[in-house]
Image (cartoon, rainbow, N blue to C red):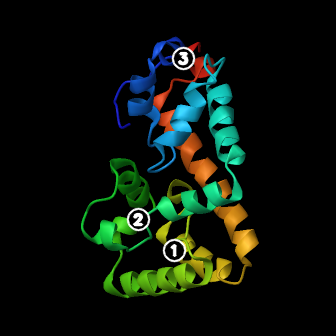
Amino acid sequence: MLQKKKLKLPEVNRLCYTDFIDTFGNVVEKCPLLAAMVWEDNPFTSLDDLQSKFENAVDQLTLTGKSRLLRLLSPFGGKLERAGKLSPESKIERASAGLNTVNADERIRLSELSAKYITKFGFPFIVCARENTKESILKGMERRLNNSVAVEENTAITEIKKIANLRLRDLVEDALISKL
């Protein structure tokens, strides 16, 4: 997914099923099934259309499917992160928020809040790291711990869509921009 050259929309529309999954399978972290659902809806008329189809695929999941989707993501400060085994996309996104430069106190606070969050909601704290800083993420975790499960599930799904949209913009050239 971290290719250097963005695909043009006609190239996206020509991708066979396997190549589409290889390219877009981690647009929604660890969920190539959503890319498979989206591939069924090709051809795509624009980047916005492709983004909309990914969002619709998330929305079409059952409550159980959405619940499982929320549990796929790696918690901040979790085992995968400590072991350096996050997806390349997640590493870059977390670094953009400054999470690769946390000091010892911030690391402890992040781990504590993350554990409280998972205990309360049953899934990791989900936020679009590219739209945040480590400070806003910590404050957001504290604030969102006061939410109900239903509110947090909806918030997390919205954040997943933001992440997916940014990842799609990393992969596909926006036709409007390319014509300028």
Question: Residue 9, which numbered label?
Answer: 3
Q: Nearer the viewer, residue 121 or 175?
A: 121
Q: Secondary structure at mark 3?
A: helix
Q: Residues within 10 Å of mark 2 (few under 14, many from 20)?
A: some
Mark whose residue sits in front, 2 or 3? 3
Position of residue 66 measured from the top left corner of the image (x, y, whole percent): 63, 57
The residue singled out by tag 2 in the image is: 98
Q: Residues within 10 Å of mark 3 (few under 14, many from 20)?
A: some
Q: Is residue 44 above or below residue 169?
A: above
Lower sequence index among marks 2 and 3: 3
Lower sequence index among marks 1 and 3: 3
Q: Secondary structure at mark 1?
A: helix
- Would residue 70 appear left or right of 31 to someone viewing this image? right
Point 59% across, 31% down: residue = 38
- Would residue 94 appear left or right of 36 to someone viewing this image? left
Instruction: Identify which amino acid the numbered label 1 is placed on.
Output: Glu
Q: Is residue 174 above or below residue 81?
A: above
Instruction: Identify which amino acid the numbered label 2 is placed on.
Output: Gly
Of the 4 image quadrants, the one containing the C terminus is: top right
Instruction: Identify which amino acid the numbered label 3 is placed on.
Output: Leu
Question: Residue 135, which numbered label?
Answer: 1
Q: Are marks 1 and 2 in contact (CB under 8 Å)?
A: yes
